[in-house]
């Protein structure tokens, strides 16, 4: 497990939890999914990662990466706070994904 990654995800998560929900995200939904639901699914995965001190089960690892892919498709239509909110979620998913890959290859 990479402590630096865990620390960065912890800091990003604290920032995320203190952020207000950007109103524009209610209008960002499309065939890629409901952003509110994606946010909730990612929250559960990120919380599990942090509670597990950098360990995430395979199912949640897949969920968080799928959610990040959906958010990547929505991101070009967002500006300001909505874009920042979504970018932060995507960044956490990227960090978690890399830490999971590193953990798998070192086992």
Image (cartoon, rainbow, N blue to C red):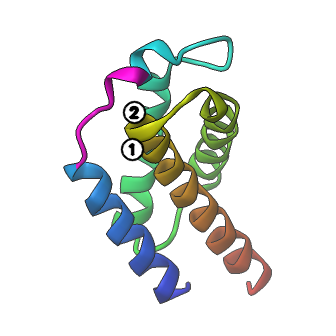
Determine which residue is flagged by label 2. Answer: 40
Do the CB atoms of the residues marked 2 and 1 lie less than 8 Å apart? yes
Give percent across and percent down for residue 49: 45, 62
Local secondary structure at mark 2: helix
Residue at 20%, 51% in the rendered image = 18
Give percent across and percent down for residue 55: 51, 69
The one nearer the camera, 57 or 10, is 10
Crowding at dot 1, Cα within 10 Å, few <14 / some 14-19 / many 20+, comes out as some
Local secondary structure at mark 1: helix
Give percent across and percent down for residue 85: 42, 44
Residue at 61%, 35% in the rendered image = 75
Task: Please state if 106 lies on the left or on the right of 8 as rendered.
Answer: right
Task: Please state if 102 lies on the left or on the right of 19 as rendered.
Answer: right
Checking the image for residue 43, the label placed there is 1
Q: Residues under labels 2 and 1: Cα distance?
A: 5 Å
Q: Give the range drawn in magenta.
A: 19-24
Image height of 10 relative to 67, above or below: below
Image height of 18 relative to 5, above or below: above
Residue 10 forms part of the magenta stretch: no
Task: Quadrant for residue 20, please give it.
Answer: top left
């Amino acid at each position: 497990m990479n402590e630096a990654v865990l620390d960065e995800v912890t800091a990003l998560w604290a920032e995320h939890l203190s952020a207000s929900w950007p109103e524009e995200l209610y209008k960002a939904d499309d065939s890629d999914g409901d952003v509110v639901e994606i946010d909730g699914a990612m929250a559960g995965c990120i919380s599990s990662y942090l509670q597990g001190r950098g360990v995430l089960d395979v199912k949640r690892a897949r969920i968080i990466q799928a959610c990040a892919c959906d958010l990547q498709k929505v991101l070009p239509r967002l500006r300001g706070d909505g874009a920042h909110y979504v970018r932060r979620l995507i960044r956490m998913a990227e960090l978690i994904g890399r830490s999971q890959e590193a953990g798998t290859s070192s086992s």
